[in-house]
Amino acid sequence: MTSVKEKLIDWKNRLKDRHMLTIIVVLFAIIVAMGIWIYKKQTEYRLASENQYNMAFFELVDYVQNVETYLAKSLISSTPEHGAETLTNVWREANLAQVYLSRLPIDSVELEKTSKFLNQVSDYSYSLSRKNIYNEELTQEDLDNLQELHDYSVELENTLNQLSADMTEGRITWGELTKKGTVAFAQEVSNISKDSFSNLEENFHEYSGLIYDGAFSEHMTSTKKKGLTGDNINEEKAKEIATKFIGEDKVQEISLSSKSENTDMVTYDFNVKVNGEQEPNMVISISEKGGHVVFMNYNRNIEAESVTQERADEIGKEYLASHGYENMKETYYLKQDGIVTINYAYEQDGIVVYPDLIKLKIALDNGEVMGIETTGYLNNHEKRDIPEVQISKQEAKEGLNEKLEIKSENLAIIPTEWKTEVLCWEFKGRVDDTDFLVYINAETGKEEDILVIVNTPNGTLTH
C-alpha cells in the first residue's frame, strides 16, 4: 500500500514538471486530432457509399423503365426485323438493370422480385429475338407471355418509382438500411407500401429518363451543320444580333460571359439584364458561324395561368415566323410551373420533318416567349428532295399490328441511328390503354420505328 502511495506522489510531482505536462498535452491533442480525422474519413466514406448506392438505384429505375417501354413496343411490332431489334433491346436493358441491382447493399423482398423478373424477361426476350432473326413469327402464346411480362414491368416500375420517391424525400436511407439489415428494409417497404404503393404520383412519366424533348430529339446532333449557314461573325456583331432578337426596347444591359469554343457549335454567350430587373436574368447564345440564335432563356415567377395550350401553340408559331422560321408545326409539349415547353418540327409540302426541331418555352400567364433552343434545326435544316412514295398508305396499313386502333395517319421524315433520314407513313394509334406511333418506310414497307406516347396531365411525351 505504501509503495502505491509513493508512486502516486511521484507521478504527481512529475506532472508539476512543465516538460512532462507539455508532452501530455501534445499527446492529448494528437489523440483528439486523430479522432477528428477518423470521424471525417468515416463521414466521407459513408457519403461516398450513399452516393454510389443512389446512383445504382436510379440507374436501375431507368433501365427497368426502358424494359417496360421496349416490351410495350414488342407487343405491336409486326415485322420480324423490327421485332428482333426491339426484343434484343429488352434483353440488353434487362441485363444492364441486373448489373446495377447487384450493386445495392440489400436483398429485400422487393428486390428479389426485381431480380427474378429481370432474369425471366432477359432470357425470354433473347429466345424470342432468335426466332425473329430466323424469320419465324411469334405465336399467340409468345405474345401472351410478353403481355404478362409487360404488365408486371408496369407494376415493378411503379414500385421502384415509389421507392425512389421515398429515398429522395428521406423516408428511407441507405445508411439506415445497411445497419438495420434486410428484415428492417422489408418492414420499411411493407409499411410504406400499405398507403403509398397504390397511390402513385401521376407525374411519374416526367421522370428524367424520358425523352421529353419529343419524338426523335435524341438524333439532333449532325456532323455537318446544314442549317448553320453564313460567314463567321465577331463579338460585336453577335451582341447586335442578340439585342435585336430580344428587342432593343427590352435590353437594359448586355455583356459577354464567354465564348464556347470546345463544342461542335462555337457560340458567343451573353448575360442580359432586362428592363425593370435588378440583376442579369437572361442568357443568350449566338453562333459564330452565321450569327444564328442557338439558345435563349430567362426565368420569372408565373402567378396564374390564363393562356390555353391551343393559344400557346399559335403564339409559338407566330413567334417563330417573325424570326424567320417558317412552316413550323407543333408536336409535343410539357407544362410545368406555369410554363409550357413546346417542340416545333419543320413541315415541307405537308410532310413533318422531325430532325428540324426547335423548342420554345412560353409563359402561360401572358404568352411571353421565355426561351428558345434551335440545335436540331441548325444541325439538320435544309430543303429536302423528298423521294416519291412507293408504298401506298393502304399497303403500309396492311403491315400494322391488327390490334392497333388507328387515330391519325400522315407522312413524316424521321432520322435513323445512322444519321440518315427516311420517309415514312406515321400512324398514331392505340392498343389497349397505350398510345403508339408506328413508322412504316414509304419506299420499302419496312417497319422503321415504334414510339410509345405518354399522355400526362402536364403534357404529351414520347419514348
Image (tube, grey):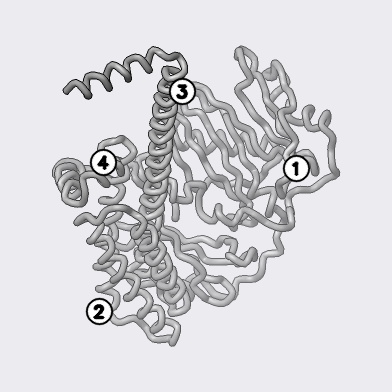
Q: Position of residue 55 (x, y in %)?
A: 41, 48
Comparing 381 with 263, the one in front is: 263
Q: Earlier in the sequence, mark 2 or mark 3?
A: 2
What distance separates the C-alpha of mark 3 from that of mark 4? 40 Å
**Mark seen at residue 261:** 1
Disc 2 from disc 1: Cα separation: 56 Å
- Residue 81 to residue 70: above or below: below
| Callout 2 secondary element | helix
Which quarter of the figure is the N terminus placed in?
top left
- Could you tell me residue 332's position as x and y percent? 48, 47
Mark 3 lies on a secondary structure that is: loop
Q: Nearer the viewer, residue 22 or 244?
A: 22
- The 10 Å Cα crowd at callout 2, few under 14, some 14 to 19, many 20 or more, is few
Q: Secondary structure at mark 4?
A: helix
Residue 418 found in image quarter: bottom right
What residue is rendered at 47% in x and 28% in y?
364
In the image, farthest residue toward the front: 2
**Residue beneath label 2, please?**
141
Residue 59 lies left or right of residue 225; in this view the side is left
**Mark 1 residue crowding within 10 angstroms, few (<14) / some (14–19) / many (20+):** few
Q: Of label 2 and label 1, which has the lower sequence position?
A: 2
- Residue 120 is left or right of residue 43, and the answer is left
Name the residue tied to disc 4: 176
Q: Is residue 337 visible?
A: no
As shown in the figure, which amino acid type bears the numbered disc 3?
Answer: Ile
